[in-house]
Image (cartoon, rainbow, N blue to C red):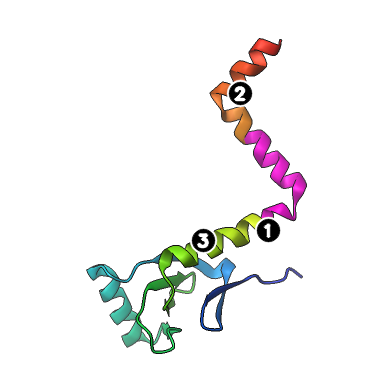
Amino acid sequence: MQRAKLLNVGFGNFVVSTRVVAIVSPSSSPMRRLREDARQEGRLIDATQGRKTRSIIITDSNHLILSAIQAETVGQRFMLMEDAQAAKRPEQAAAMAQALLEDDPEYADDEADDA
């Protein structure tokens, strides 16, 4: 059984990272409407601990999680988790790196010069 990775959304609150669909800023009108709709439908989870909402995390179950941490910070934490997970699988990371090199035109030119 695979262990769930938890994403820290601030103040001792965590979200299962595989359930995250989007991390957005709450300042736009569509996000405000989305938040109000979720509140009315009972899909809103407030993890701000009474502080100002600085990011909204949307899950695959269509729940919205409010966080007092900036969207950029939560996104960086998410990417660090993904990078750490890739590092645990070196053969997959090597295959991904090889695929990137093969798609790189400069790399292809170097290969032609070596031949």
Up the image or down, 67 lies above or below 24; here it is below
Q: Residue 76 — which label?
A: 3
Q: Identify which amino acid the numbered label 3 is placed on.
A: Gln
Up the image or down, 81 lies above or below 48; here it is above
Between marks 3 and 1 in the image, the one whose residue lies nearer the viewer: 3
Extreme-left residue of the structure = 29
Q: Identify which amino acid the numbered label 2 is placed on.
A: Tyr
Magenta stretch holds residue 96: yes
Disc 3 from disc 1: Cα separation? 14 Å
Q: Is residue 42 left or right of residue 17?
A: left
- Residue name at image x 41 percent, y 69 percent: 70
Q: Where are the magenta residues, as a range?
A: 86-99
Query: Secondary structure under badge 2?
Result: helix
- Residue name at image x 51 percent, y 83 percent: 11
x then y, percent, for residue 94: 72, 41
Crowd band around label 3 with a 10 angstrom C-alpha radius: few (<14), some (14–19), many (20+): few
Query: Secondary structure under badge 3?
Result: helix
Crowd band around label 1 with a 10 angstrom C-alpha radius: few (<14), some (14–19), many (20+): few
Q: Identify which amino acid the numbered label 1 is placed on.
A: Gln
Q: Is residue 18 left or right of residue 41?
A: right
Query: Secondary structure under badge 1?
Result: helix
Residue 21 visible (yes or no): no
| Residue that numbered label 2 is attached to | 107
- Residue name at image x 74 percent, y 56 percent: 88
Q: Residue 85 — which label?
A: 1
- Residue name at image x 62 percent, y 28 percent: 102
Disc 3 from disc 2: Cα separation? 29 Å
Residue 75 visible (yes or no): yes
**Image quarter in which the C terminus is found:** top right
